[in-house]
Image (tube, rainbow, N blue to C red):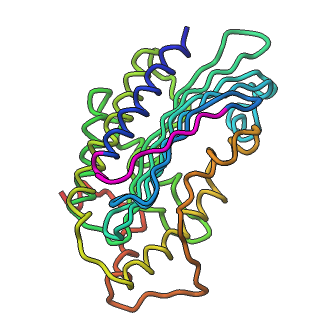
Amino acid sequence: MYTESVISFLQSLQNQICNALQAEDGRSVFEEDRWQSKLGSGVSRVLKNGAVFEQAGVNFSHVKGEEMPASATAHRPELAGARFEAMGVSLVIHPRNPYVPTSHANVRFFIAYPEEGNPVWWFGGGFDLTPFYPFEEDIVHWHTAARDLCLPFGEEVYPRYKKWCDDYFYLKHRNETRGVGGLFFDDLNDWDFETCLNFIRAVGEGYTQAYLPIVAKRKHTVYGERERDFQLYRRGRYVEFNLVWDRGTLFGLQSGGRTESILMSMPPLVRFEYRYEPQAGSAEARLNEFLQPRDWLAELA
């Protein structure tokens, strides 16, 4: 009853996002990898060495299991041991130009089947932006798009999910946010099923409306070796977060998911440097001003 409509939407969303990114890149196309495992199946699409996107991955997966993994039951201990289905579209975009931000989006649906009682379902997802050379107008556009897609569902939705994003995408060992935030939510079943699905649809379709205008504005900005080195260094923070803190990565690995698809979020090139400090007053040092939670629309709009 529930899963058919969600799968139909997710597959359509994957097509829509891939087509939009391909058109923006203008050179490379997504290569499709259909896979099956003991848990389920999926379609991974990866664009490599594009004119705009150094690597872009957009993955659809639908998996089933006989027992919920620990990462999924940490907040729902009553579902420990239950059969489950999980499906979603997850994407990470690593642009070539350091002035174009990295971005991530994810929409997902879980349904658990406890031995006693009715099935328990919930949605999750969101999107977030990780600039290396931030522009205030881009951040305002990003958060305006996030706020506007939330408004039909209640004025309290954007502030709540914006804060959740700030809290979730925080590198505790670095005392900094991964970027400038966006939306993040989990365990969404407060509304009826159709309303929840409509919200997920708004988030999924709103991602390209939020991101692609920024890409179009910044993709021709001239850059040199200095900016490229800084981009590769900051990509290291992305790796740190995904491997240390990200619940989606943990869920995928703990549930026996397909490793290549789970780790497709990793940047194609990255560098680490011991005790790196940007020069005081430089454009690179300015990034630090943007790596703490802020009310961007109140401060900058």
Q: Quadrant of residue 253?
A: top right
Q: Residue 254 appears at what percent x and percent y?
A: 76, 42
| Residue drawn where x is 72% and y is 34% of the image | 73
**Horizontal side, residue 37 vs residue 123: left or right:** right
| Residue drawn where x is 75% and y is 37% of the image | 255
- Asked if 292 appears above or below 20 in the picture, the reply is below
User: From this viewpoint, which residue is outermost toward the left?
Assistant: 301
Of residues 222 and 249, which is closer to you in this image? 222
Q: In which quarter of the image is residue 278?
A: bottom left
Count of number-bearing discs: 0
Q: Quadrant of the C terminus?
A: bottom left
- Asked if 10 appears above or below 280 in the picture, the reply is above
Of residues 148 and 202, which is closer to you in this image? 202
Q: Residue 260 appears at what percent x and percent y?
A: 65, 48
| Residue drawn where x is 55% and y is 8% of the image | 1
**Horizontal side, residue 85 vs residue 214: left or right:** right
Q: Residue 39 appears at what percent x and percent y?
A: 73, 29
Q: Residue 237 appears at what percent x and percent y?
A: 54, 68
**Horizontal side, residue 190 vs residue 217: left or right:** right
**Horizontal side, residue 23 vs residue 189: left or right:** left
| Residue drawn where x is 77% and y is 29% of the image | 38
User: From this viewpoint, which residue is outermost toward the bottom?
Assistant: 279
Q: In which quarter of the image is residue 88?
A: top right
- Asked if 95 appears above or below 228 in the picture, the reply is above
Of residues 75 and 245, which is closer to you in this image? 245
Residue 11: in magenta span: no
Start-end of magenta stretch: 23-35
